[in-house]
Image (cartoon, rainbow, N blue to C red):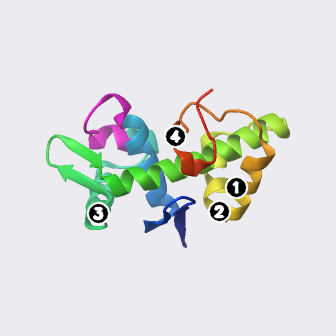
Amino acid sequence: MATEITSTASGLVGATVGRRTGQYLLEIDWLSEDTDRVAPGEIATRLDVSGASVTEMGSKLEDAGLVTVKKYTGVKLTEKGSEVARELTWRLCVVENFFGEELSADLDDDQSYEIGYTLPPEAIKRLRDLVDHPCIDRCPQTRQDYDGCRIA
């Protein structure tokens, strides 16, 4: 089942991503913090999948306009892919922050992602409204459309 990933400022990001597709985008985004392109082997290791799975998903993501793939050099998010990854990171951030600070329940990234992915945009915004403090360090820091979500 796919869900629309939306941005409160610009409307639909322009992509409908499945749960697993979103995980690939997040990993590529997080792994590319210090590099231009991410090696498929790094993605495979982080997601605990085979290299063939990464290659297959890379082709699908490229066809959807979410990444560019260069043989032997790796994968890079496109602008559209980055926007979807930022939205997913924001969702994860809000959920992790809310559960951790307001409910004293520590969730791991997978649990936070599953909840953040599943909740509709209105619910995510409502959780964010209930949390009056900065999010985790991976949250987009300067995006006005994420309602003040910022780095601690």
Q: Residues within 10 Å of mark 3 (few under 14, many from 20)?
A: some
Residue 37 in magenta?
Answer: yes
Q: Residues within 10 Å of mark 4 (few under 14, many from 20)?
A: many
On the image, the x and y values in percent for residue 122 come to 70, 63
- 2 and 1 marks in contact (CB < 8 Å): yes
Q: Residue at x 55, y 38 (%)?
A: 139
Please state, as top left, top right, bottom left or bottom right, where the C terminus lies in the image: top right
* Residue under pointer 2: 121
Q: Residue at x 69, y 56 (%)?
A: 124
* Residue under pointer 3: 65
The range drawn in magenta is 32-44
**Label 2 to label 1: alpha-carbon separation:** 6 Å
Q: Nearer the viewer's eye, disc 3 or disc 1? A: 1
**Label 4 to label 2: alpha-carbon separation:** 16 Å
* Residue under pointer 1: 125
* Residue under pointer 4: 140
- 3 and 4 marks in contact (CB < 8 Å): no
Q: Is residue 148 left or right of residue 66?
A: right
Query: Which of the two discs, 4 and 2, labels the residue nearer the N terminus?
Result: 2
The residue sitting at the right extreme is 103
Q: Secondary structure at mark 4?
A: loop
**Label 3 to label 2: alpha-carbon separation:** 23 Å
Query: Which of the two discs, 3 and 2, labels the residue nearer the N terminus?
Result: 3
Q: Is residue 24 visible?
A: no
Query: Which of the two discs, 4 and 1, labels the residue nearer the N terminus?
Result: 1
Q: Residues within 10 Å of mark 2 (few under 14, many from 20)?
A: some
